[in-house]
Image (cartoon, rainbow, N blue to C red):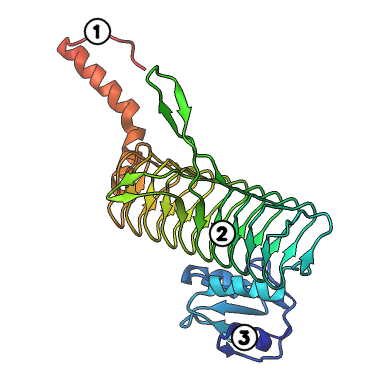
Amino acid sequence: MTIGAVAQALELPLEGSPDLEITGLAGLEDAGPADLSFVSAAKHAGAYASSGAGACIVFSDFDAIERPCLRSASPYADFARAIELLYPRRRPDPGVHPTAVVPGDVTLGRDVSIGPYTVIGSGCQIGDATVIHPHVTLYAGVEIGADCEIHAGAQLREGTRLGNRVVIENGVVLGSYGFGHAFRADGTRVTIPHVSPVELGDDTEIGANSTIDASHPGHPRMGHARTQTRIGRGVKVDNLVQIAHGCTVEDGTVVCAQSALAGSTWVGKRVTFGGQSASAGHLHVGDDSMVGARAALAGDLPPRSQVLGTPSMPRRLWVRYSVARQYLPGLVRRVRRIEEKLGLGEKKPRS
């Protein structure tokens, strides 16, 4: 594909000859004369100058030093679009594989593909152009929108609802019973039936082996009665994430790998949870907040908060704490010497 054809497909302005043949994509350090690369920040100008890339996607005001380039407001995002363009993923042909189990009351849209050994429950609805790969299980009453992709080994429990263009990666479980119990008078526990289904909005992606639990009626928090676990539009969930019953995750939020949200956590829009971060239950995290890697929330966060650490603290305080703690051993020694001179406390060997 020529760089001119790439520019036309991505609808980006081109500088330089449109006839350069592009056969691959690569980072600046690895790119060759037939590769398309990208520059995501001005600090990469040196790497760009020494790169062997034939063409690059760059910012509108970046000095391209006479190399063919595509001008973009978001070079990395447009490079991702170029990956889809030059390396299109093969989609299975429409149709139902003979080994799949599909009851007669299932509603299938146009051009649906259902792979080998998939089991579809009674009353399911599957939208146009959706792909369901092998060994997927849909329990009764699952609803899937148009142009979705459900990868091998995923399991969607009763009544789970997916919007359009949703991607479910391998091994995901949606709608299993949440971890909720009530106490009998004698102190023994009874499991609460989590019968309220999980709902995912349009353009959501759920990473491999992540789990999102079903809920049960009545999770009061800030005037809301949560009867289901709801994941908003455009939410991106990484691998190995646990989202418990009754959680709400609003549009545009990102949850990175090995993170966990306890029951009835309410996460606002465009929030980022770093890897291995967590929240206690019944919390509210305000819009545009950032919860750093391994941070543990124990209370609500106002909008645009940035927290780090366990327990979590404001980002600036955490930075000061991280710098100060390296001096603690020396500070302890100084305090001991002062106590010895003043005759206070028990005399201890110096460390």
| Nearest the eye: 282 or 240 | 282
Residue at 64 percent across and 54 percent down: it is 169
What amino acid does circle 3 point to? Ala
N-term mark: 1 or 2: 2
N-term mark: 3 or 1: 3
Q: Is residue 284 above or below residue 128?
A: above
Q: How many labels were placed on the picture? A: 3
Residue wearing tag 1: 346
Query: Marks 1 and 2: CB-CB under 8 Å?
Result: no
| Nearest the eye: 206 or 339 | 206
What amino acid does circle 1 point to? Glu
Which is closer to the viewer, label 1 or label 2?
Answer: 2
Q: Is residue 3 above or below residue 115?
A: below
Please identify the quadrant where the N terminus is shown.
bottom right
What amino acid does circle 2 point to? Glu
Mark number displayed over residue 7: 3
Report how far apart the C-alphas of labels 3 and 1 lie in the structure: 76 Å
Please tell me whether mark 2 sits on a helix, a strand or a loop: strand
The answer, for residue 52, to whether it is visible in the render is no
The answer, for residue 122, to whether it is visible in the render is yes
Which is closer to the viewer, label 3 or label 2?
Answer: 2
Please tell me whether mark 1 sits on a helix, a strand or a loop: loop
Residue at 54 percent across and 70 percent down: it is 76
Mark number displayed over residue 205: 2
Mark number displayed over residue 336: none
Please identify the quadrant where the C terminus is shown.
top left
